[in-house]
Each structure stands twice: as structure tokens, then as C-alpha cells.
Amino acid sequence: MRFLARILASVALLGVAVMAQAKLTTPEEYTMAMKANAQAVGAMNKAIASSAFADARPQLATLRQNYTALQGFWTDKKKDDAVAIVKDGLSRLDALDKILSAPTVDQMAAQAAVKEFGGNTCGACHKLYREGDAASGFRFKPGVL
């Protein structure tokens, strides 16, 4: 029974990995990626706040993978400003990765980098293309897609 549970867990993880690598084409897939990003940022903030910097790195990898998929989504929609925002986000993730990769991690710099990422990347895109809030849920503004 334990063996079967491990196999099922492995298959589920493989499915998540394959889905995360897939191209985002629908608003529903986009929404799933955004929810995963919100969870990753939250977990990353928690890890950095508790000085568990190694635990922040998988969250950073999730964000990088999702932002790469987002870049394709917005490219397909011919939204150059959204593509630029995503590219900026990827650059900010690279900067955060450098901070987290340092032999001695500067916790305050890491926290500031995460805050800048969220405000300048997530915030910028939401301002242009999304409406709603965390409580009611976000959706694309009319006419965006």
C-alpha cells in the first residue's frame, strides 16, 4: 500500500511538472499559474523571513518557470507591454537568485527584492490587465483578451 501511495504521488508530481512546463493558452491556465505564483511568493516570503533561504529557492524556480510560460502567453496575445513586464519580472527573479545564492545571504536585501518583484511586476500587470482583488478573485479586464 505504501508503495502504491509513492507511485501515485510521483505520477501526480510528474503531472504538475508537465503542466507547469506546458504553454499557457487559456484564461483558466493563466489563472492557475497566477494562483501558483501567489502561493510561491507567500512561501518564499515565509522562508526568507525565517532565514530558511534554501527553502526559498524552489519557490523562485516555480516563479521563473511560470513567468517563462507567461511570456509566451502574452507574446501570443500580442501584448508587448505585458511581455516587457514579464521580462522585467524575470530579471528581478535573476537578481533575487543572486542574492539567495550568495555564501552569506543578506536577508533584508532578499526581502526587498521580493517586495520589488511583487510591486513592480505583479502590480504593474494587474494595473493594466486585471481587476478584482484577492478576496473576490482576479479576472481579466473586459477587452484584454
Image (cartoon, helix red, strand yellow):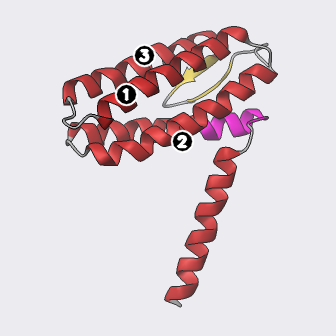
Q: Is residue 26 magenta?
A: yes
Question: Left of 1 or right of it: where is 46?
Answer: left
Q: Secondary structure at mark 1?
A: helix
Residue 99 lies in the magenta-colored region? no
| Secondary structure type for disc 3 | helix
Q: Tag 1: residue type?
A: Leu
Q: Amino acid at mark 3?
A: Gly
Which residue sits furthest bottom? 1
**Quadrant (top left, top right, bottom left, bottom right) of the C terminus:** top right
Q: Nearer the viewer, residue 27 or 16?
A: 16
Disc 1 crowd, CA 10 A, few/some/many (<14, 14-19, 20+):
many
Looking at the image, which residue is at 65% across and 14% down?
A: 82
Tag 2: amino acid: Ala
Q: Is residue 115 left or right of residue 137?
A: left
Q: Which residue is mark 1?
A: 96
Question: What residue sits right under mark 3 in the picture?
Answer: 119
Depth check: give the residue in front, 33 or 90: 90
Nearer to me, 28 or 71 = 71
- Dot 2: within a 10 Å radius of its alpha carbon, few (fewer than 14), some, or many (20 or more) residues? some
Q: What percent of the width, then of the height, locates residue 112?
A: 29, 20
Image position of 17 with respect to 144: above or below: below
Q: Is residue 112 above or below residue 127?
A: below
Q: Residue at x 79, y 13 (%)?
A: 143
The earlier-in-sequence mark between 3 and 2 is 2
- In the image, 2 versus 89, the foreground residue is 89
Q: x, y (%) of residue 72?
A: 73, 28
Identify residue for label 2.
36
Prevailing secondary structure of the magenta residues = helix
| Inter-mark Cα distance, 3 to 2 | 17 Å
Residue bounds of the magenta highlight: 24-33
